[in-house]
Amino acid sequence: MTPLLNGLLTGLFLQLALGPVFFYIFGITVDSNYINGLSGILAVTIVDYLYIVLSLIGIGRLLQKDKIKKIFGIVSSVILVLFGLMILYKGLAFINRAGHAGSVAWTPVNSFTSCFILTVSSPLTIVFWTSVFSAKAIEKNYKKQQLVIFGIGTGLSTFLFLSLSMMILSLLKSNIPGLIVQILNCIVGFVLIYYGITRMIKTIRN
């Protein structure tokens, strides 16, 4: 199996562990349209590739220090909670006003910006990628160039998985009543807040 295909399959497998970014883009897509969701997916893919590059040049080892991990862990947790509250507020505002729009009107620009901030706020992802690349280097005996190709495959998996998932969601969304859409928004908001609070608790405990 080539490093590119191996990276793609590894990345797609890792995508099955749905995280806060997936649910955030889910919220954007269900609340607006596929174009806005795709704009957010591009932002996430760019940040993933940025972190993959930093992992490959060894920055992950620096971020393994306890003090740095704690600072970044708390910052990313707070951002998750804030984004969750924003989506939750929009959903509740829509429901309380009997179908009138809430405070956020999604556009490709603010979808891209918010997804970029949400993804880049968790630089400990570099530590994760560093671990993955180290494991693959040992398992497959990959050299530096092969690890780069493997990294291209893993980054591509983010775009493929999210864009396909959101395309299916956008096709199904036309049959979902507006009220249900905003209830889904509220659920997404709660999920993001949950991720943020549990991440913060784990960070402080560790």
Image: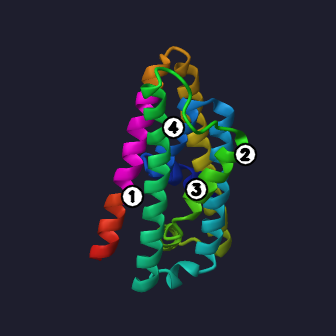
Res 145 quadrant in image: bottom right
Going by the picture, which residue comes out furthest to the right? 109
Q: In the picture, which quadrant includes the C terminus?
A: bottom left
Task: Identify the mark nearer the N-term, 4 or 1.
Answer: 4
Marks 3 and 1 in Cβ contact (< 8 Å)? no
What's the distance in space between the residues labelled 3 and 4, CA to CA? 24 Å
Q: Which mark is residue 154?
A: 3
Q: Amino acid at mark 1?
A: Gly
Determine which residue is flagged by label 4: 27
Determine which residue is flagged by label 2: 109
Above or below, 126 relative to 114: below
Secondary element at image label 3: helix
Task: Identify the mark nearer the N-term, 3 or 1.
Answer: 3
At 46% from the left edge and 52% from the top edge, which residue is drawn?
14
Please name the colour scheme applied to the rendered image. Answer: rainbow
Nearest the viewer among 159 and 135 is: 159
Task: Identify the mark nearer the N-term, 2 or 1.
Answer: 2
Where does the image place residue 86, in percent across and percent down from the top left? 50, 46
Task: Identify the mark nearer the N-term, 3 or 4.
Answer: 4
Nearest the viewer among 135 and 26 is: 26
Going by the picture, which residue comes out furthest to the front? 97
Q: Which mark is residue 196?
A: 1
What's the distance in space between the residues labelled 3 and 1, CA to CA? 25 Å
Where does the image place residue 161, in percent across and percent down from the top left? 55, 41
Q: Amino acid at mark 2?
A: Val
State which region is magenta.
182-196
Secondary element at image label 1: helix
The answer to whether residue 1 is visible is no
Q: Is residue 9 left or right of residue 193?
A: right
